[in-house]
Image (cartoon, helix red, strand yellow):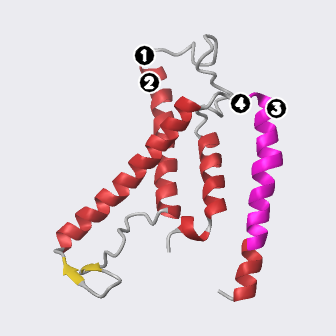
Amino acid sequence: MWGILVQPIGFFMFIAAGLAETKRIPYDMPEGESEIVGYFTEYSGMKFGMFFFTDFIETILIACLATTLFLGGWQVPYLMADGFHFPWGSLVQVPHLLIVTLQIFSFAFKVIFFSWLFMTIRWTLPRFRYDQLMDLGWKGIFPITLANIIVTAFVLLWFGK
């Protein structure tokens, strides 16, 4: 079962924390792209390119983690090792090379979707002020994730999984 179905609150908290970790809008306090003065003004050429490249690598890494943890990674619905097993009982045989190719494309599609989502959020939302970011982190995200961990622990203890 995919993690987003088991832990939807954890998924949204992971996405919010992942966006904050990439230091992109709306969480780009250290950088402040729209201002002319920042710590990137001293870099140009390849040094600036490497800093900019690491931001994109962080975004892709968070997208890969979200795909693996919450969207089943390389899993394609109803696809098993020998082909598609549909819930109504039919089986469609698929060659192994095609199965591997479908799984690779599935993972890549999910990562591209998350990267697109992060870019859309970046283009849409304005930047938080420092006080808004601290309120969101300490009064919003932290208590919700703590409550999610406690509820998950009680559910696992109660149902004995």
Give the extent of the magenta segment: 129-151
Q: Is residue 41 above or below residue 143?
A: above
Q: Which residue is mark 1?
A: 45
Q: Classify residue 98 by image quadrant.
A: bottom left
Q: Position of residue 32 (x, y in %)?
A: 63, 22
Q: Which residue is mark 2?
A: 49
Separation of marks 3 and 2 at Cα, in angstroms? 31 Å
Q: Classify residue 129 by image quadrant.
A: top right
Separation of marks 1 and 4 at Cα, in angstroms? 29 Å
Frontmost residue, 118 versus 69: 118
Q: Are marks 1 and 4 in contact (CB under 8 Å)?
A: no
Q: Earlier in the sequence, mark 1 or mark 4?
A: 1
| 155 to the left or right of 68 | right
| 140 to the left or right of 29 | right
Separation of marks 2 and 1 at Cα, in angstroms? 6 Å
| 129 to the left or right of 108 | right
Q: In percent of the image, x 31 and y 75: which residue is there?
A: 79
Q: In percent of the image, x 18 and y 69: which residue is there?
A: 97
**Disc 2 element:** helix
| 103 to the left or right of 126 | left
**Disc 4 element:** loop
Q: Nearer the viewer, mark 3 or mark 2?
A: 3
Q: Which residue is mark 3?
A: 131
Q: Image quadrant for the C terminus?
A: bottom right
Q: In this figure, what is the number of numbered marks? A: 4
Q: Are marks 3 and 2 in contact (CB under 8 Å)?
A: no
Q: Is residue 139 magenta?
A: yes
Q: Position of residue 87 (x, y in %)?
A: 35, 83
Separation of marks 3 and 4 at Cα, in angstroms? 8 Å
Q: Is residue 107 above or below residue 156?
A: above
Identity, as a three-letter code, of the amino acid under mark 1 = Gly
